[in-house]
Amino acid sequence: MEYRAKPGIGVWLTILVVVAAFAIALWGIDYSLDPEDQVLKTMLLIPAYVFMGLFALLVIGAFNLSYKLGDKGLILRWGFYTKVVPWKAITNVIRVEGQSTLCPIIGADWPGYRVGIYLVKGIGPIRMYTTYPDDGFIFIKSEVGFFGLTPPAEMYERMLQYIAQKAEKEIEVVNMDELPEEVKGQSEKSDFTYKLLKNLNVWMLLAYGAYLLIFFPGSGAPKLVILLLVLAIALFFFNTSNAARLYHFSPGGGYAILALGILVNGIFFIVSFGEISLK
């Protein structure tokens, strides 16, 4: 029995947005910096290419995520990586039900693609190989690690029963909805303040980009104004990804990171407005 995950619309949209962001950033660095700024250009391009490489690995993983139930064990594939969990090494087979609160530590946290090390509130750290784990997943405890799987609905029960049978374990059930909130924690996705601050970051960035697109051409403003847009894009992705991680340990810290992004983008906006309108 084998299941290969198929990237959904959320994965495709994420790829489209990030590729567009990288394209704008690379163009902006090249356009705004002159040959005599080669040192600064190199300092900006190196991390850009590093993150492009990491992003490429995540994309490859999104198109090569699978579970296979072999004779010797559970075979998990992600990208170029393969992990074999021997049947004899499995200690617990758990059906996790209800709404889970997942905190990404390292890995991909895209719509329909949750892979990497996650802290699941009320359970602990798990290496997730999942698509949509928020409403339940199969949790495998073993001597070689803890793993989360999300086979599709039509295969879920068969795969769960097969794993339990081969591992010779009873299926345990954990209902996340029955856990007290102080144990389960709150997801940033249900926090109004967090969502408001994140949406403001998105709209600020879009408004800033639209302003430069409309008013910069022919304004006579210095090309370095475009570099501010590159920095704004980098700041947006850094802040929104790390705010979600920090939120689960300190909601106030998550708010602060997002608020800082709004403040800095506002400063960039004011500087650009002054440069363009005064020319």
Image (tube, grey):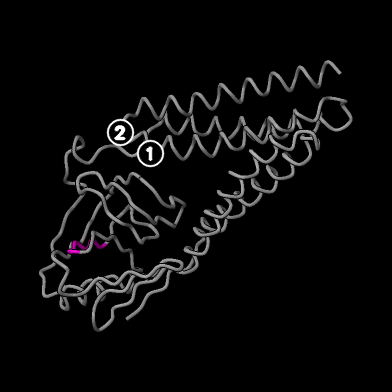
Q: Nearer the viewer, residue 204 or 166?
A: 166
Residue 127 has which mark?
none
Q: Which residue is mark 2?
A: 249
Q: Nearer the viewer, residue 87 or 80?
A: 80
- How far, Cα to Cα, is label 1 from label 2? 8 Å
Q: Position of residue 8 (x, y in %)?
A: 50, 62
Under tag 1, what secondary structure? helix
Do the residues under discs 1 and 2 have CB atoms within 8 angstroms? yes
At label 1, which amino acid type do we have?
A: Arg
Q: Which residues are magenta?
A: 138-143
Under tag 2, what secondary structure? loop
- What residue lies at 58% left-to-right and 43% top-to-bottom? 47
At label 2, which amino acid type do we have?
A: Phe
- What residue lies at 44% left-to-right and 57% top-to-bottom? 112
Quadrant the N terminus occupies? bottom left
Residue 245 has which mark?
1
Q: Is residue 247 above or below residue 220?
A: below
Q: Is residue 259 above or below residue 127?
A: above
The local crowd at label 1, few if under 14, some if 14 to 19, many if 20 or more residues have their Cα within 10 Å, is many
- What residue lies at 17% left-to-right and 43% top-to-bottom? 179
Image-quadrant location for residue 218: top right
